[in-house]
Image (cartoon, coloured by chain):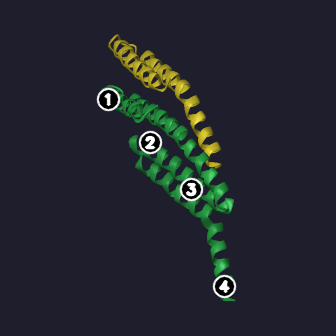
């Protein structure tokens, strides 16, 4: 599953959905949804190998596991939020897409709060 | 398997469009609507498992 396959899937999906757009534009949306899902499945498989190497690196360098976990969680949140909001925007409902993106931003802030608190506590430790 | 999903959806779309036009011109509006609804259900039956697997993978991978 090289990049050529992914490009082929994308181009075929777009061409078919343009073709179907005149008569029935809802099927054009289904085709673009199908293409996006297929490409995202391939990307997630490719990302899995990256995750394993990250864990291997983490075992060599003594990093606190929670920080790397929060980092990975952030990547996941942005990935899914971007996928959903892009699809909503494709369908013409930019407001729903914007709401999904806002939720993604807030959930990232919520996930990263513990790290911020830990940083502030360490700084306070230096000062007092 | 992925590429054929796109072509299957396109095929269902084309078929539903053609059948809808034929039914519409022969005066049966509600049948045309039912055919397009059936096409929608078929496409959803194909896509939803893929989406579910996708989100399961993402959940496991990113430990969301």
- Whichever of labels 4 and 3 marks the residue nearer the N terminus, that label is 3
- Whichever of labels 1 and 3 marks the residue nearer the N terminus, that label is 1
Q: Of A73 and B17, which appears nearest the observer?
A: A73
Q: Of B59 and A49, which appears nearest the observer?
A: A49
Residue receiving disc 3? A74
From mark 4 to mark 1, how far is it between C-alphas? 61 Å
Q: Residues within 10 Å of mark 2 (few under 14, many from 20)?
A: some
Give the image location of residue A19, x and y in percent. 30, 26
* Pointer 4 chain: A
- Residue B14 quadrant: top left
Label 1 SS: helix
- Residue B13 quadrant: top left
Point out the frontmost of discs 3 and 2. Answer: 3
From mark 3 to mark 2, how far is it between C-alphas? 20 Å
* Pointer 1 chain: A
Residue receiving disc 2? A87
Q: Residues within 10 Å of mark 3 (few under 14, many from 20)?
A: many
Identify by letter the chain in yellow: B
Point out the frontmost of discs 4 and 3. Answer: 4
Residue receiving disc 4? A126
Q: Residues within 10 Å of mark 1 (few under 14, many from 20)?
A: some
Q: Check residue A15 in the rendering and tell me which mark sits there, or answer none.
A: 1
Q: Colour of chain A?
A: green
From mark 1 to mark 2, how far is it between C-alphas? 17 Å
Q: Check residue A64 in the rendering and tell me which mark sits there, or answer none.
A: none
Q: Do marks 1 and 2 share a subunit? A: yes
Q: Do marks 1 and 3 share a subunit? A: yes
Residue drawn at x 38%, y 32% is A4
Point out the frontmost of discs 4 and 1. Answer: 4
Label 2 SS: helix
* Pointer 3 chain: A
């Amino acid at each position: 599953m090289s990049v050529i396959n992914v490009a082929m899937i994308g181009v075929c999906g777009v061409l078919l959905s343009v073709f179907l757009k005149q008569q029935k534009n809802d099927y054009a949306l289904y085709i673009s949804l199908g293409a996006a899902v297929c490409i995202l499945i391939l990307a997630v498989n490719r990302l899995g190998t990256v995750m394993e190497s990250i864990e291997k690196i983490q075992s060599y360098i003594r990093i606190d596991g929670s920080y790397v976990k929060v980092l990975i969680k952030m990547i996941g949140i942005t990935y899914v939020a971007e996928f959903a909001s892009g699809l909503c925007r494709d369908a013409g409902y930019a407001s729903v897409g914007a709401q999904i993106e806002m939720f993604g931003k807030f959930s990232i802030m919520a996930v990263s709060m513990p790290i911020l608190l830990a940083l502030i506590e360490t700084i306070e430790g230096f000062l007092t | 398997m992925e590429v054929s999903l796109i072509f299957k959806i396109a095929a269902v779309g084309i078929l539903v469009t053609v059948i809808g036009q034929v039914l519409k011109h022969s005066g049966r509006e509600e049948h045309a609507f039912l055919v397009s609804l059936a096409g929608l259900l078929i496409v959803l039956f194909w896509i939803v498992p893929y989406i579910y697997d996708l989100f399961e993978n993402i959940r496991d991978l990113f430990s969301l």
